[in-house]
Image: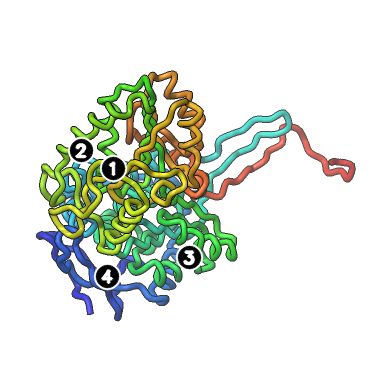
């Protein structure tokens, strides 16, 4: 059985579900270990069918009143929700660093402020969506974004707080109610998020959190025919299962499924800047879906680029994510370490060369050394499949056409990076089939801009109005400009 409260580095958090505004324990539970040192953090309530059904029922009961409030009255509630996250900033940082291995410094300076903005931005954006007029010769079309209903949100373990609020923000701002299924390997910040919502005065049932494994709790959630929307970030195999079940119930899905993005270095690139940016691909131990993991470098500058990048990589500090100087922390779970190690071992056995790294780091069993593999074939699994660890590959090209061909010759299309003279790099970026691509930069994000991928990287876009197009039912109220008389002759 679980206790009523876990204490992690002085931060108290409930291990239980949050359903209908109250904490609900389970008769079954699972162990949660820290990726930092494999210590047991506690036992977490595991959601059974009954908990999922209760959460969806609570969300369904809360939906009419929450939807009827309107965007203007929902906004102050969501603003208070954001403020309550800020009031618990230290706790969020400690919990996600301990259960997900995210750098404490990144939590403090990036993730928590972004989580707050995810709520306040979408609450503000929703104010401008109602009754926008589209004028045509025959009529005025009043276009409404109406709440869809109960929304299931399933988040991954690499960024649970940021991605959870990234989806919760527009869903709640639109007037939907939410059942959140956090990652089994990193559920603690989602539980603390429920406390923040409760303190902010979100009505019971508007936000519910049910913990558990994807194969059980997640499967029960997406199978509930009462859902109006499903938003998922995770793996392709899981997305296929979700899509099959959701299709049977005709429930719209938003699926963000990771990537195998190119990092293109043209002959006219600023090599030092490109090399420094390439070293950033190891952040969060490479557990970043939008990282440019395939380095495609013009062969005329490849040696100079590798030398410059080596200088930056050798300065990276691998270690405890709670220490300010650490730049590369642990991999989330022993199973993920084995997955990463398997990819690298098979690539080396097939003839790849490790320019650096290639093995578990001496710091500890869940720390993998930043790795760069070359002598890899385009059709090899290390080039074609997402590793989700601190592992990059290096290939060279002789022409722009070859660079684009290599960039596009994978089944993923999420992100990308292209370094070179601005006009040249922009032209190459335009030819890459992907959801977004940075020119001479990396990581620039704006909540107003669309985010999402193509091919196996997913379906749909999030951000700005694109989020509301998914989380809302869009209605057209047609008001004719001239008196209308019914006639069977009309076509």
Q: Which residue is mark 4?
A: 16
Q: Nearer the viewer, residue 451 or 357?
A: 357
**Depth order, front residue of 388/478:** 388
Is residue 423 depicted above or below 321 in this figure? above
Q: Nearer the viewer, mark 1 or mark 4?
A: 1
Q: Nearer the viewer, mark 4 or mark 2?
A: 2
Q: Which of the labelled discs sits on residue 372, or is there none?
A: 1
- Disc 1 vs disc 3: Cβ atoms closer than 8 Å? no
203 to the left or right of 101: right
Label 1 residue SS: strand
Q: Is residue 107 above or below residue 38?
A: above
**Of helix, strand and loop, which one carries label 2?**
helix
Which residue shows up at 31% across the image and 55% down it?
345
* Label placed on residue 70: none
Horizontal placement of 342 versus 63: left or right? left
> Residue 456 location in percent, x, y?
50, 49
For marks 1 and 4, give the CA distance. Answer: 42 Å
Image marks 1 and 4: residues in contact by CB distance under 8 Å: no
Quarter residue 72 falls in: top left
Which residue appears at 39% of the width and 33% of the height? 396
Q: Quadrant of the C terminus?
A: top right
The nearer-to-camera label among 1 and 3 is 1
- The quarter of the rendered structure image containing the N terminus is bottom left
Residue at 19% x, 62% y is 34
Which numbered tag is attached to residue 313?
2
Q: CA distance from mark 3 to mark 4?
A: 20 Å
Q: Give the number of marks.
A: 4
State left or right for residue 390 relative to residue 39. Answer: right
**Residue 212 in the image, given as x and y percentages of width and height:** 34, 69
Cα distance in 3D space between marks 2 and 3: 42 Å
């Amino acid at each position: 059985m679980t206790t009523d409260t876990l204490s992690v580095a002085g931060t108290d958090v409930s291990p239980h579900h949050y359903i209908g505004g109250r904490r609900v324990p389970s008769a079954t539970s699972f162990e949660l270990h820290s990726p930092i040192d494999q210590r047991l953090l506690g036992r977490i309530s595991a959601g059974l069918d009954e908990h999922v059904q209760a959460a969806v029922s609570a969300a369904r009961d809360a939906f009419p009143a929450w939807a009827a409030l309107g965007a203007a009255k929902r906004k102050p509630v969501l603003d208070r929700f954001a403020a309550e996250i800020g009031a618990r900033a230290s706790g969020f940082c400690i919990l996600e660093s301990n259960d997900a291995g995210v750098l404490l410094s990144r939590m403090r300076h990036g993730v928590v402020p972004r989580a707050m903005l995810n709520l306040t931005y979408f609450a503000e954006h929703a104010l401008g969506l109602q009754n926008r007029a589209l004028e045509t010769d025959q009529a005025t079309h009043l276009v409404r974004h109406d709440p869809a209903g109960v929304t299931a949100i399933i988040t991954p373990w690499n960024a649970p707080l940021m991605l959870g609020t990234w989806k919760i923000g527009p869903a709640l701002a639109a007037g939907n109610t939410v059942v959140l299924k956090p990652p089994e390997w990193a559920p603690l910040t989602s539980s603390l998020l429920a406390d923040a919502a409760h303190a902010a005065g979100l009505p019971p049932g508007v936000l519910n959190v049910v913990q558990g494994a994807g194969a059980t709790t997640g499967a029960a959630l997406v199978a509930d025919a009462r859902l109006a929307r499903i938003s998922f970030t995770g793996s392709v195999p899981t997305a296929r299962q979700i899509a099959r079940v959701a299709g049977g119930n005709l429930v719209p899905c938003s699926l963000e499924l990771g990537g195998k993005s190119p990092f293109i270095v043209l002959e006219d690139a600023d090599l030092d800047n490109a090399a420094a940016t390439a070293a950033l691909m190891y952040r969060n131990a490479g557990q970043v879906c939008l990282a440019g993991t395939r380095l495609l470098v013009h062969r005329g500058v490849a040696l100079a680029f590798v030398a410059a990048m080596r200088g930056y990589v050798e300065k990276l500090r691998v270690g405890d994510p709670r220490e300010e100087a650490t730049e590369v922390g642990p991999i989330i779970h022993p199973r993920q370490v084995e997955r990463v190690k398997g990819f690298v071992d098979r690539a080396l056995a097939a003839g790849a060369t490790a320019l650096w790294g290639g093995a578990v780091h001496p710091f500890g069993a869940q720390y993998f050394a930043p790795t760069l593999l070359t002598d890899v074939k385009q059709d090899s699994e290390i080039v074609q499949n997402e590793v989700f660890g601190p592992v990059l590959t290096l290939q060279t090209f002789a022409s722009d056409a070859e660079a684009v061909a290599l960039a596009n010759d994978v089944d993923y299309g999420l992100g990308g990076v292209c370094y070179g003279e601005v006009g040249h790099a922009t032209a190459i970026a335009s030819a890459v089939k992907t959801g977004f691509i940075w020119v001479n930069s990396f990581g620039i994000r704006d909540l107003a801009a669309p985010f999402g991928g193509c091919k196996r990287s997913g379906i749909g876009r999030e951000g700005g109005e694109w989020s509301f197009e998914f989380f809302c039912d869009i209605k057209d109220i047609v008001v004719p400009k001239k008196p209308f008389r019914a006639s069977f002759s009309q076509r």
